[in-house]
Amino acid sequence: MKRILIIVILTLVGCSDKVSEEKLMSLNIDKLYISDQEDRKNNETNNWSIVAKRDEIRRKRVGQLIDSNKIISAKDYAKAAMIFQHGVDSSDYLKAVEFMKKAMKIDSTINKSLFAAATDRYL
């Protein structure tokens, strides 16, 4: 039941153009990552100005999670990197690179394709 409720909530977050900043700011890294990916699933119908605003809020929330030491695993850092990969400038892309470096340091077996993509985007 809990799983179904989470799926319904995330679907609403991903589909609604009026997702409040407060809702996004309360999410943990897993939900932020899912929200980020949901916003990109059907790019034909997305309003990219709305997605860009959500991306900004997600990056802000990831910063808060990092500052409060709530991101510790390699997978968490990789999810944070993906969110910053969808940033707007080189400082965001550099954070994606740095988060992937941290993820690879924690777990050398983690998929490194995002590190390559983030480095390419940063350069």
Image (spheres, rainbow, N blue to C red):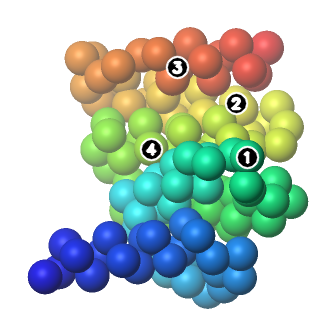
Q: Quadrant of residue 61?
A: bottom right
Name the side, left or right, on which 91 lies relative to 75: right
Is mark 2 in CB contact (under 8 Å) with mark 1? no
Looking at the image, tell me whether mark 2 or mark 1 is earlier in sequence order. 1
Residue 25 at x, y = what percent?
57, 77
Q: Quadrant of residue 89?
A: top right
**Identity, as a three-letter code, of the amino acid under mark 4:** Lys
Looking at the image, tell me whether mark 4 or mark 3 is earlier in sequence order. 4
Q: In the displayed image of the protein, which residue is found farthest to the left?
A: 1
Identity of the residue drawn at 70% across and 30% down: 94
Looking at the image, tell me whether mark 2 or mark 4 is earlier in sequence order. 4
**Identity, as a three-letter code, of the amino acid under mark 1:** Glu
Residue 106 at x, y = what percent?
29, 30
Asked whether 92 or 27 is in front, the reply is 27
Q: Disc 3 marks which residue?
A: 115
Q: Disc 4 marks which residue?
A: 79
Q: Secondary structure at mark 1?
A: loop
Is mark 4 in CB contact (under 8 Å) with mark 3? no
- Residue 27, label in figure: none
Q: Disc 2 marks which residue?
A: 94
Q: Disc 1 marks which residue?
A: 44
Q: Is residue 82 positioned above or below 11 on the image?
A: above
Q: Is residue 97 positioned above or below 68 on the image?
A: above
Q: In the displayed image of the protein, which residue is found farthest to the front?
A: 44
